Structure formats: structure tokens, C-alpha cells
Image: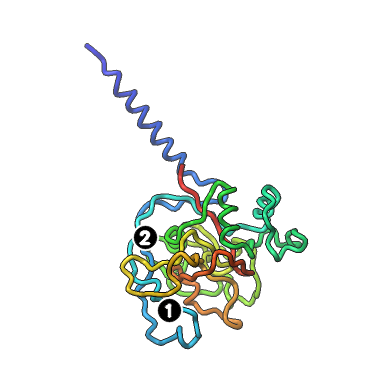
């Protein structure tokens, strides 16, 4: 009788492949896994009350989020927190890069090590992510990490709650250390995806596929930023700006006191 010695070898090979896949999906320190699959991107909301005109915003409400559509993404890793001053200082020291303009004499202000870095333009953010072995997230990756797969309006659900994010309603009037709002994290455990600092994404500001909205700002002129920031209009927040589907655009050369970033990374 001839014994089949091939089956155990095939089984061991398959187990090794499976083990490799599991290992590759283990998030690096400070990152979370965003699993592969579809999510709902954008919105079909309409500004029926004319709020955009009332508040004098620079673009119509909702139209650049049309049409709501499904996007299928492969798995990727996302930074759990916005990049901090301390992390950026390591990058500056290692590469000789320009420190943010709000660091006196090129040093982090006392006690601000765990605050998100700001005053970094898109190119600064891209260089940091590349130096760290990562990259800026695409607009779709950012939105999925913020809202999950159920199309929620905010990282925590569908109702705005000023106690769950650093917005104009908190009364803080400044940045907060990353991860300060535990109850405001996204379905995947990503913090500060509403408020604190705006976050750069990799993408140019372009219309979504199937959109009938046109704008002179579309094209390879402005980069998309997401999430809004700690500032409001006066001393209050407009929930519209903190939604997971909200998009805004900035020149990639711009650096602002309430704009920072986080990184993403492909699975390997």
C-alpha cells in the first residue's frame, strides 16, 4: 500500500500562508487595521434651508459630496492618532526639515509634546509619512476609517455631540492632546476624526464619479482636507463641518494653525 505523503505537505504549506496573512494584518504600533470591503462614501443630502448662504460658506453645502456611492477598498492600516509634535520633532531632527512656525526657536512649546502638530503643509506631511515608512491616506481611506460601513454622519453615530470631539462648542478654545475624546473614536478605534486639527489627504479636490456638480476649484490645484478643527464660528460649532463626509480644499503649499495630518500604510 502506497501512503499519500503529499497531503500533509500541502496542508503545512497552506497553514504557513494563512499564518503569513494573519501576521501581515497585525497593525504596527500606533496604527489600526481597516479591513477590506465596501463602505458608503459621500452623501445625498440637500441644503433645503439655505444654510450655506446664511453662514456665507465658500462652497455650497453637500453638493461636492454627491452622489453617495459605495467604494470597495483593500485592507490598510491607519494611524490611531493624529501625528504629534513629539513625533514630528523626531522627523525634524533626523532629516533637517523645517520645524513648524509655532515652535519657538525650532523647539516644541513646553507641555505640547502630545498635541497634534500643526503649521505643516501638504508636502511636509507627505515627507513625514514617507520617512516613517507610511503615506498619506486617500480621501476614501480617511472617510472609511472615520465612518465605518454604516454611513454614519459622525465617527460616533448620526447625532452631533460636542462632548465627543474638540469643536467650537467645547469651550476649550485650543487644540487638545491626541486621543483626548475617548467617546468620540470611530468604529475602528481611530481618534479625533472630527475636530482638533484638519487632516491632509493624498488626493486632489475632484468631483466624485457620477457627480453633476461643477466647480472652478476642482482639478489638480487643491488638496482635500478632512475632519474640521477645534475652531468654530465664534464660540460655537456648526455640526455640518464635522460630518464624516464633509470635504474641504486647501492649496498644498498652505500651512495653518489648525491643520495637521495622520498617516496610512499598505499591508505587506
Judging by the rendered image, the residue that carries numbered circle 1 is 61
Residue 47, x across and y down, in percent: 39, 82
Quarter of the image where the N terminus is located: top left
Residue drawn 41% across and 75% down?
A: 215
Q: Quadrant of residue 214?
A: bottom left
User: Left or right of 16: which side holds 189?
Assistant: right
Residue drawn 66% across and 51% down?
A: 91
**Of residues 122 and 171, the one drawn nearer to the viewer in this rendering:** 122
Residue 15, x across and y down, in percent: 38, 32
Q: Is residue 93 above or below residue 101?
A: above
Q: Residue furthest right?
A: 105
Residue drawn 57% across and 81% down?
A: 233
Judging by the rendered image, the residue that carries numbered circle 2 is 39
Residue drawn 50% across and 85% down?
A: 56
**Of residues 95 and 246, the one drawn nearer to the viewer in this rendering:** 95
| Among the two numbered marks 1 and 2 on one chain, the one whose residue lies closer to the N terminus | 2
Residue 37, x across and y down, in percent: 36, 54
**Of residues 62 and 202, the one drawn nearer to the viewer in this rendering:** 202
Q: Distance between the Cα atoms at labels 1 and 2?
A: 22 Å
Q: Residue furthest top?
A: 1
Q: Which element carries disc 2, helix, strand or loop?
A: strand
Residue 71, x across and y down, in percent: 35, 59
Circle nearer the viewer, 1 or 2 = 1
Amino acid at each position: 500500500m502506497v501512503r499519500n505523503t503529499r497531503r500533509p505537505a500541502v496542508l503545512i504549506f497552506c497553514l504557513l500562508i494563512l499564518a503569513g496573512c494573519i501576521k501581515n494584518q497585525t497593525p504596527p504600533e500606533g496604527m489600526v487595521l481597516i479591513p477590506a470591503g465596501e463602505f458608503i462614501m459621500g452623501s445625498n443630502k440637500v441644503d433645503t434651508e439655505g444654510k450655506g448662504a446664511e453662514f456665507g460658506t465658500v462652497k455650497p453645502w453637500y453638493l461636492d459630496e454627491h452622489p453617495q456611492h459605495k467604494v470597495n477598498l483593500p485592507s490598510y492600516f491607519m494611524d490611531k492618532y493624529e501625528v504629534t509634535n513629539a513625533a514630528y520633532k523626531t522627523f525634524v531632527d533626523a532629516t533637517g526639515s523645517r520645524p513648524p512656525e509655532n515652535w519657538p526657536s525650532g523647539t516644541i512649546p513646553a507641555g505640547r509634546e502630545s498635541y497634534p502638530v500643526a503649521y505643516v503643509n501638504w508636502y511636509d506631511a507627505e515627507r513625514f509619512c514617507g520617512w516613517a515608512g507610511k503615506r498619506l491616506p486617500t480621501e476614501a481611506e480617511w472617510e472609511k476609517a472615520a465612518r465605518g460601513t454604516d454611513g454614519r454622519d459622525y465617527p460616533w453615530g448620526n447625532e452631533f455631540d460636542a462632548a465627543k470631539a474638540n469643536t467650537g462648542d467645547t469651550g476649550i478654545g485650543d487644540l487638545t492632546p491626541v486621543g483626548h475624546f475617548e467617546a468620540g473614536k470611530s468604529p475602528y478605534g481611530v481618534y479625533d476624526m472630527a475636530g482638533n486639527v484638519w487632516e491632509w489627504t493624498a488626493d486632489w479636490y475632484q468631483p466624485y464619479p457620477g457627480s453633476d456638480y461643477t466647480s472652478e476649484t476642482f482639478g489638480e490645484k487643491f488638496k482635500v482636507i478632512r475632519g474640521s478643527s477645534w475652531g468654530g464660528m465664534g464660540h460655537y460649532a456648526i455640526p455640518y463641518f464635522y460630518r464624516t463626509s464633509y470635504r474641504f480644499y486647501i492649496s498644498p503649499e498652505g500651512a495653518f494653525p489648525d491643520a495637521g495630518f495622520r498617516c496610512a500604510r499598505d499591508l505587506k
